[in-house]
Amino acid sequence: MGGAVTIRNVEPADVAAVRALLVETWHATYDAVFGAEKVTAITDDWHSFARLTREISEPRAVVLLAELGGRIVATLAARSTEDEGLSLSRLYVLPEAQGRGIGRLLLDATLARFPGAKVVRLEVEPQNAPAIRFYEACGFTRLCGTVGCGGRADIPAVVMERQLTPPGS
């Protein structure tokens, strides 16, 4: 897998491939944490074809993908919030494409689409140490721990944020 990385909006024709990427990365990341059966249930809900299709048409949202060598290897979803912020709801890179800077490229492309955002927030499962390290390397700090990641009371989360403009600006 080589070549230049291309970042673009997810189109309706991409939804099945994006869903397959999400299912694969979720199982690779979370089967050891939650078990394969629970991961399947979560991905069937959060990453259903219908839900992903609705998400790409939301006016306050951006859903991007990254292609490498013509293959979709990563995806990101974010939406603007009422407080001039940005909520990052998803950033996943296929395991074999991790460590190549693709996640950072997706994050930077997203932030460029929301130039007025003052802060970006996200939730990450506390046992996902590689993701936490990635977000910290991208300038995020941990705010608190919580439950209810993605609206599910059975999934814990670490809330992280990154200031995009200096406080008081």
Image: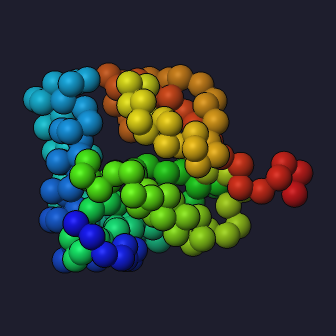
Work out which residue is located at the far right of the displayed protein and give it. Answer: 168
Side (left or right) of 145 relative to 58: right
Can you tell which quarter of the image residue 141 is in?
top right
User: Of 139 and 63, which appears nearest the observer?
Assistant: 139
Q: Residue at x 39, y 51 (%)?
A: 99
User: Of 138 and 56, which appears nearest the observer?
Assistant: 138
**Quadrant of the drawing holding the C terminus:** bottom right
Is 87 drawn above or below residue 72 in the view shown? above
Residue 23 location in percent, x, y?
A: 18, 48
Q: How many marks?
A: 0
Q: Residue at x 64, y 46 (%)?
A: 139
Residue 71 location in percent, x, y?
A: 21, 70
Is 140 drawn above or below residue 57 in the view shown? above
Can you tell which quarter of the image residue 114 is in?
bottom right
Q: Is residue 57 visible?
A: no
Q: Is residue 161 visible?
A: yes
Residue 74 location in percent, x, y?
A: 32, 60
Side (left or right) of 27 relative to 105: left
**Quadrant of the drawing holding the N terminus:** bottom left
